Amino acid sequence: MISEEEFEVVCSDSVKLRGVLLIPEFPKAVVQFNCGTGTKKEVYLSFLNYLAANGYVCCLWDYRGSGNSSAENLGKCDFTFSDYGTKDMPAIKTFLSRRFSGLPLFIVAHSAGGQQIGFMEDLDHVKGIVNFAVSSGYYPNMPLAYRMKAYLYFYVFAPVSVLFTGYVKAKPFGLMENLPKNVVYEWRDWLEKEDYFFDKKFFGKTVPGGHFKNYNLPIHTYWTTDDTISNEKNINAFWKHVESDQEIGFTKLEPSDFGLKNIGHFGFFRRNMKDALWRNVVNKLDNLLLSQQEL
């Protein structure tokens, strides 16, 4: 039996975040799930319910200015993209550490949700990280057709939307959740550089140096060969900047190995991946849990 519990968290700058906890009857550990940017969080529910059915308390939540954590006047808020890692993720971690103080904590993340973990000031007591499609997002490394779509979103649609509304009003067009303008503009700046926010223009200047060079926990990343964003070039461009005194591992997925035509950037979380992939993820978490208990 899995119970659902809505919650609200207040960040260090008084911004409120909202989300839901999936709590199994006999939990063995806690998962802080960090979503991708502007993604409707319900996309992840089936996957997280599966983790919960296997004994993991799962925390699904929205970043500031997005989804159920959206500001009342999105056009006037000054939220930035890096606030996700420097303010939002730490607030969720603190909440979970207090709410479930007796349980080990893992972070499971998709896309930007895994990129920005290193910005968190305090990673104490996090036992491991499991990522999906975490990479740089350098435009020239993307297929041409998708690159053109990205250019249209960031350099045409977003500025025009901001001009008329004060924010990027994407939800009515089915593109993604609505986002504050500075979130999109900082994101756009990072995407222009192959090294993403590790570029000398940003790293240690507009964003903190964080833990990227001194993680002390195991990290594993799943990626798929047909992902237009987190392709092999962008995977390498991001992870060459990350170091840990424990293993940093990768699982490369081929859609054909699963009898699928595509997986892409979001396909990890479709129900048809339950037997093929989700069981592997649970095994990964179980093994991380066991290895921590043996220390």
Image: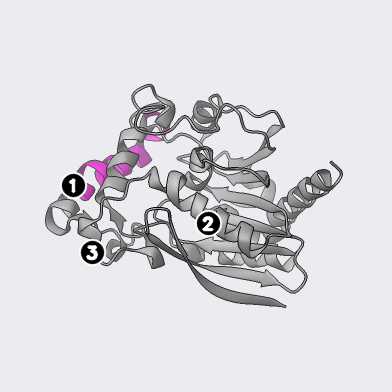
Q: Secondary structure at mark 3?
A: loop
Q: Residue at x 40, y 67 (%)?
A: 68
Q: Say which amino acid is labelled 1.
A: Pro
Q: Residue at x 23, y 64 (%)?
A: 73
Query: Which quadrant of the figure has residue 142?
Result: top left
In the depicted structure, whether residue 242 falls above or below residue 292 = above
Q: Is residue 56 left or right of residue 287?
A: left
Q: Position of residue 45 (x, y in %)?
A: 57, 66
Residue occupied by mark 2: 92
Frontmost residue, 278 versus 68: 68
Residue occupied by mark 1: 159
Residue occupied by mark 3: 73
Q: Residue at x 64, y 67 (%)?
A: 49
Q: Distance from label 2 to label 3 (Cα)?
A: 23 Å
Q: Secondary structure at mark 1?
A: helix
Colour treatment of the image: one colour
Residue 155, magenta (yes or no): yes
Q: Say which amino acid is labelled 3.
A: Asn
Which span of residues is magenta-colored? 140-159
Q: Position of residue 211 (x, y in %)?
A: 55, 33
